[in-house]
Image (cartoon, rainbow, N blue to C red):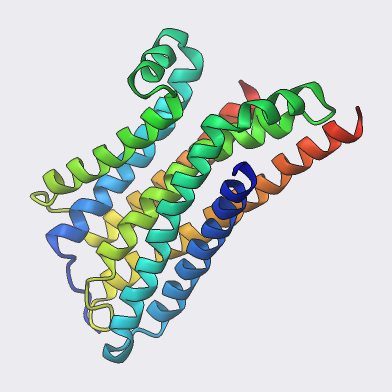
Amino acid sequence: MNAARLSPTTSGFALAAAVTVLFSTVVACVKDANAPFKAFMKSLTDHDWTTQGLADVLLFVTLGLIFTRLKVAPGHLTAILIASVVAASLGLGLWYALY
Amino acid sequence: MADVLLLAHAALGVLGSIAAVWVFVEALNARPENAERTRIAAMLAAVPMIGAWICGGYWYVHFYPREKALILAGPWPFAHNLFMETKEHLFFVTLILALLLPIVVREPLYSNAAARKMVLSVAGLIGLTGLALEGAGAVIDHGVKVALLKR
């Protein structure tokens, strides 16, 4: 088995996933701390959670298509993805435990 | 209607998580012979997660507010304040990973160590976050139960 590179599609969407996960976490915290922002999100689809979900998926697809042009080392990419998921999970848990 | 949606949400989430674990095992034993099976398993992780999002989302927006009021007035308000709040946002992490999985398994895992590590990571994270979401769902459900028992 060789230590081959990842295809541009895999690299792009993996990086997009890492960014989207962090974006979603930040949005979750900001909308709780900022009532006007939460109201704005609610006004778009009737519920802030629905808006957030749609924005996450849209961002993931858009960034994935854009990031296919970037070149990131596969090892770094996997580490970035794991780190972003761990940061998001702990961040959300801590935010709601302390907020 | 509300109960069907809630149970479908939980069942689809479990199905997607189990399929992600299936992908993990296939990736551990990646060979040309199981490449197609791995891709099918990845789709079986992604599609139920989308279904869990739709069913759970509809239930959360239209039916959860009554249960939320019960929980907050009951002895376990943290079932909403901590567990539901974390769950409803952590779900997006699992969803994005589930959407990523079918893309990553298109790589030849049997000959590409980097892709295999990526698939093991994504599938493992779906399994772990999926378990956390199911556990949080149980706590939320119990929050409603103890609130009703206290009435």
Where A79 sits versus B106, above or below? above
Residue B21, position as x, y percentages in the image: 49, 70
Work out which residue is located at the far right of the displayed protein and give it: B150
Seen in the image, is A38 located left or right of residue B39? right
Q: Which residue corresponds to the image point at 33% horizontal and 49% vertical from the top-left?
A: A80
Q: Quadrant of residue A95?
A: top right
Q: Look at the image and tell me in which quarter the C terminus of chain B lies.
A: top right
Residue extending farthest to the left is: A69
- The quadrant of the rendering that contains the N terminus of chain B is top right
Q: Depth check: give the residue in front, B80 or B109.
A: B80
Q: Is residue A86 visible?
A: no
Point 62% across, 35% down: residue: B84
Residue furthest bottom in the image: B33
Q: In which quarter of the view is residue B109 placed?
A: bottom left
Q: Where does residue A26 sit, x and y in percent of width and height?
A: 41, 28
In the rendered view, would you say B127 is above or below B9? below
Identified at 31% across, 74% down, the residue is: B39
The residue at 42%/73% (across/down) is B23
Q: Find residue A86 and report its horizontal and vertical position in percent.
A: 48, 46
Depth order, front residue of B108/B20: B20
Give the total of numbered labels.
0
Q: Is residue A95 visible?
A: yes
Q: Residue furthest top?
A: A36
Q: Relative to B149, is A75 on the left or the right?
A: left
Q: Is residue B30 above or below residue A28?
A: below
Q: Is residue B67 left or right of residue B115?
A: right
Q: Nearer the viewer, residue A13 or B47?
A: B47
Q: Where residue A39 appears, x then y in whole percent? A: 42, 12
